[in-house]
Amino acid sequence: MPVWNFCNFFILKESLAFIFEMAQLHEDALREYDELELCYSETVNVAGKQRDFGGVERGDDQAALLNPGNKPLTQIVQDDSFREFEFRQYLFGCQAKLLFKLNRPYEVASRGYSFIISFSKALALYESILPFCMREVWVVTACLALINATSSHYKDGLVAPDVEKEFYRLEGDLYSLCRLKFMRLAYLVGYGTHLERSPVNSASLSMLPWPKPAVWPSIPPDASSEVLAKEKMILQASPRAKHFGIQRKQLPLEPSVLLREANRRRASLSAGNMHEIFDGGMSPSNKSHAAAMSRTNSSPGNFESSIDRPMRLAEIYVAAEHALRNTISNPDLLKSLSSLEEFEQKYMELTKGAADNYHHSWWKRHGVVLDGEIAAVSFRHGNFDLAAKSYEKVCALYAGEGWHDLLAEVLPNLAECQKILNDEAGYLSSCVRLLSLGKGLFLTKERQAFQSEVVRLAHSEMKQPVPLDVSSLITFSGNAGPPVKLCDGDPGTLSVTVWSGFPDDITLDSLNLTLMATFNTDDGVKALKSSTAIVLKPGKNTITLPLPPQKPGSYVLGVLTGQIGKLKFRSHSFSKGGPADSDDFMSYEKPVKPILKVFNPRPLVDLAAAISSALLINEPQWIGIIVKPIDYSLKGAVLHIDTGPGLKIESHGIEMEGRTKPIENTVAENGSLTEKKKFELLKLENGRVVFPDWASETDSVLWIPIRAISDQLPKGSSSGDSQKRSIVDGMRTIALKLEFGVSHNQIFDRTIAVHFTDPFHVTTRVADKCNDGTLLLQVTLHSQVNAMLTIYDAWLDRQGGVVHMGKGDGRPTSGFFPLIISPTTRAGILFSVCMENMADTILNIKYGISGDRTTGAHPPVLVESAESDGTKQDLIFRSALIFQRPVLDPCLAVGFLPLPSSSLRVGQLVTMKWRIERLKNFEQDEILYEVNANTLNWMIAGLKRGHVSLSPEQGSRIVISILCVPLVAGYVHPPQLGLPNIKEASISCNPAGPHLVCVLPPALSSSFCIPA
Amino acid sequence: MATTACFIIVSRNDIPIYEAEVGSTVKREDAAHLHQFILHAAQDIVQDLAWTTSAMFLKAIDRFNDLVVSVYVTAGHTRFMLLHDSRNDDGIKSFFQEVHELYIKTLLNPLYLPGSRITSSHFDTKVRALARKYL
């Protein structure tokens, strides 16, 4: 029975796997190898026997994890098992081969990555017995081999998207791991100065421990020239100055100072010597200082001292390079480390590979960061275009996610690229972004440098104005509290708080602020402009902008735009009453707070006539206009007064008085408030009146002296005629235009109708008519005004014809006077006149009026103040009297003479006769007559219409006869005689003609008979 | 207590809203910067993992040499990310849970705008106390 050992087991299992493979049962074969691996790891981990690890042979540094046939198995047999170094790679190689056959490159990559990690750990355990940096070299070669194999086997689209993503991620990881180890090797041979001290490099390298060989390689004896070359390289490589003079400690690329580590690992070095090196008190993490220190410690060429002397940095590099040359058997890798150019080429290849794969796997953060590394190399090579593009990606990522610490690291680089590329817009926006980063990230001096760059560029000769978004730097908000409220059409001022993130004062040549209506978006936004240059202090500034009239609605702040030199900037961000320390707020919708409310048009003021009752025509009268501001100040208001036709402003003195409301009167009974009733005399200039200040808030009445002119003599009417004079005759209009508001922008137009009238309306009636022609004329006076009228005298003027009885001057008894007529009452005066000719009689009334202008008609305005007896002034009212002839006063009598006794028959001639008699003297001697008859019923022979002469004497008569033939039997209207020239009232029909006459049928005649 | 620990709260918009170095020793002043970088990169992993489990505590999701990134994702997709070198999984879980409570209390503050930076010193003190207790 064979003794069980791993070799036998292996032979068994592998034969089985081989058979499976032959039978195309790759899965089963793979399972055999998996089991083998499991068993091997168990046997290896059994503590006890000290086994040989392997990996010390030439060429072992090249990973053979995909090459199971690298070494014959017989070579790696050790006792009853296999050497771990070779055998684990062999097992993985077999598995990979089967997986590739199964077309599962993803699994190869996945298993490979973990294999490399775990194998690297195993290598670390045996690092002291392995060649110098064997572990790093192995990982680099293993990763590259794995990447090559898997990517060549991988075909796009054959797997699920998830797996594909994962595959690219693994590839990225492999590249990344490879890159890391490669950088470590490069650092050891002195290319550290060419590694970008970026967060990604620093994070990976500074946490990766140095290789731990048993003894650090020492410098070969004949390497003095190489040491010199390295010294030169160290000297030449000055640490890259940061842009904008940013003073920032450089990120470390090493876990601890290499100088110390290397010398410590040299067995022959005593601890005392170590302190000699570092007694300068320098910070251990600063590599460039360490390099400088090493320079001062020994002059070049003076390195043939004893081996115990601590190595200088250049010597360490040379020693490491030599040791690596011994370790590395792969010519490609050796070449990559042989010169700086080769190193950078390889470095770029690895970085690009990692970045691309991460991008494919949607690990954008990993990928973009590596883009930044590519950018750094491009930048160093002067390929600024590429560098800027890559840096932009990095910045966009960090800025988008708000990681400002990381952004602060990259953004200056981008700005530098843009500056070199002369990309003004990009450079400016980078500067603005630098300024808007947290204040703690940069020193004030650096921030000032950013600002001066912005200002310098803004005032330089830019080809075209560059737009710039400074939302993160200049923020603005409306003032706290309720929004500004304006009436429609009013201008105003808007106070806005602007926060400046600039470290120094900055001068804005102009500043515009748009307002956006919250509801109606159809309107274009309107910009408020500040005309003068504005200096923004760092921090909070309050800016007042003039506000032109806006449409009704509520408005929120829109965009702040402005100009610095030729730079057009705009800012969209609102601040919450303080400087927004980050863009966090932007991601949330802000509650929109209206800053301005413009109300819908509403009446702001009302102008109305103070009285509705009529005023005296042809007399100077006060017309009152009530000015009623409706919650709106009338400060500085101007009233334009334009009188219509037939109206004249009497004087330029206009009175204005306060109008106390009835409520106030009742409250302040003791009169203290009413005493304060304001009164002021205003001056009318060019039809304009300027309101006093006290009238801006309260109601007031404006009294304007005015005279309505009417040259018509008022006409009385007779008592029977009830018609009154049309009210329109006394109507006059005043056009008022009130300009008010802050800049007289509000205009209120109103045309006020004022009613003027005569004090009386006169009606006359003949009360009695005596036989001698004397008339008693009753004159009724209707008071037309809302005031007490006092009649002092009344008389009639005649143009001739009226002869007064009594005293002869037409006055009634003087004892009647004064006669007082209350408003809207009537009074009568009786005149006794002798009538000869009634025409053109004029009634004169001397009267006085006592009224208040607040109620209606009132005593005329005293234009001349010189009149001393102004208290009572007698007025004269003149009215033409109209007499009406009595209704029944016929001058002609028309009589229808009786028809012949024999009845009328159809076809028989009949003579119609009318007698016309003159009743009184009457001018006309020719009378026009007309006979009207229905032509269907009557045939008329002779003149139907004609003139007849009638002697003018009273009692003269004439008979008009007309020959007619009735045509129709029955009751018909007879022909009528009309006198068209004479009014019907003057005609008396006596005796009256018949309404109907009976016409008999024609007499029977045999000649008409027709035998049936 | 962990020697190195960096705690960051990342809002659902990927913005860091709270940062604290809670390790007992701060080795280097630039460490915070590197820690931020590592945690930022770890978000790539969180974005993949967060939807694969219903648990809030995602355990250690990323390793960076000796350092481990543990993540706790709240229902609102706010991420608590801890970069640490200790292996105390239970402690970390308790730490996260307690911080979650604190965070909810902060959210309930009507003056706190969700997604904005947490500037409350009380919150900071409490988080540091919790870190001393659990990490």
Image (cartoon, coloured by chain):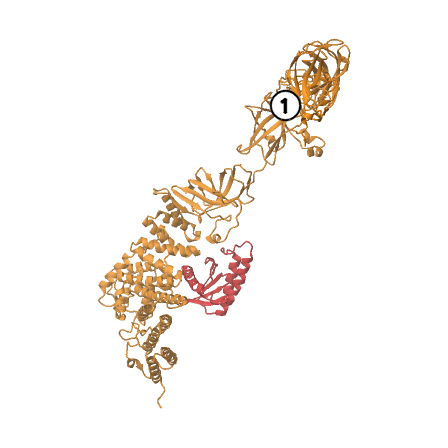
What subunit carries mark 1?
A
* Label 1 Cα crowd, 10 Å radius (few <14 / some 14-19 / many 20+): few
Q: Which chain does red denote in the image? A: B
Q: Image quadrant of residue A668? A: top right
Whole-percent x, y for residue A889 in the image: 73, 16
| Residue A418 seen in the figure | yes
Q: Which amino acid, mark 1? A: Asp
| Residue that badge 1 annotates | A729
Q: Compared to A381, does A669 lie above or below?
A: above
Left or right of A16? Residue A980 is right
- Furthest toward the bottom, the residue is A1
Q: Hey, which quadrant is residue A353 in on the image? A: bottom left
Residue A248 visible, this angle: no
- Give the x, y percent position of residue A403: 43, 56
Work out which residue is located at the far front of the displayed protein and give it: A1011
- Quadrant that contains the C terminus of chain A: top right
- Mark 1, secondary structure of its residue: helix
Colour seen for chain A:
orange
Residue A954 is situated, as x and y percent measured from the top left of the image, at: 72, 10
Tell how many labels.
1
Which of the two residues, A450 or A901, is positioned nearer the viewer here?
A901
Report the front residue among A628 and A247.
Answer: A628
Q: Is residue A134 above or below residue A621?
A: below
